[in-house]
Amino acid sequence: MKRTRLYFIRHAEVEERYHRVFGGRIDMGLSPFGHEQAQRLAEYVQRLPLEAIYASPMLRVRQTLEPCNGHLLLTPVFEEALREFDFGRWTGLHFRQVREQFNADPWDWLEWIEQGRIPEGETGAQIRARLEPWLQDKLLRHAGQTIAVFAHGGVIRQLLASLLEMPLSRMALFDVDYASVAAVDAGGGRPPEIQLANYTPWKTPGT
């Protein structure tokens, strides 16, 4: 039985003022370099045998998709479930501020989310409740097909965690760079298999 290939694609680099900031639900745009990354990423995406594209409706994802417009036969479907995590009172804070104000190591953010410890932020249970049904629906709807999901670092990590049946905190083992691509084969009565991890087409000459 043919397996479903899922390409998880993170948006390109955001505006510099949001670097090392918990942006979450802030609707920021791309940096000038981010627009360059998006252009190179589009050249890669155009060669994929995609049968559906799903995307977060947030601005940074829409701008990442813009270079693909007119070059793909598919129209992206924007889905609310794919919005980035809500970081609650961490939203808009620099890593340094999170360390100072909450006595938290910002690099442990996945663990804090999983344990529901970010004040007023989404918990791991809430995130799974919105993303796991979405994922299962797409696996059924596109069984044996190839689809792309344009989203955010947190969302991609949770989708990977759900597929691999691992805790969200373990996804700290995976780098998910700006404008990066991960690919997973799922279904067919076999465990999911990672075929590509943190591939960055914009770093590859001639991509």
Image: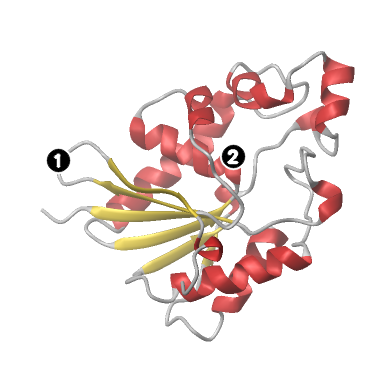
Residue depicted at 55% across the width and 42% down the height: 155
Please name whichever residue, 178 or 87, is drawn nearer the observer in this view of the structure. Answer: 178
Residue bearing the label numbered 1: 189
Please name whichever residue, 87 or 205, is drawn nearer the observer in this view of the structure. Answer: 205
Instruction: Name above or below for residue 12 compared with residue 108.
Output: below
The numbered dot on residue 103 is none
Residue bearing the label numbered 2: 154
Instruction: Please identify the residue farthest to the left as the structure is shown.
Output: 1
> Label 1: how many residues lie within 10 Å, few (<14), some (14-19) or many (20+)?
few
Three-letter residue code for mark 1 = Gly
Instruction: Name above or below for residue 16 compared with residue 172.
Output: below
Residue depicted at 28% across the width and 51% down the height: 140
With 84 as the anchor, is 175 left or right in this view? left
The answer to whether mark 1 and mark 2 are in CB contact below 8 A is: no
Across and down, in percent, residue 91 comes to 81, 36
Q: Secondary structure at mark 1?
A: loop
Across and down, in percent, residue 126 comes to 58, 29
Instruction: Please identify the residue farthest to the bottom as the structure is shown.
Output: 70
With 175 as the anchor, is 61 left or right in this view? right
Across and down, in percent, residue 60 comes to 70, 60
Instruction: Please identify the residue farthest to the front as the structure is shown.
Output: 205
Residue depicted at 49% across the width and 64% down the height: 204
Point out the tag, 1 or 2, that comes first from the N-terminus: 2
Across and down, in percent, residue 125 comes to 54, 24
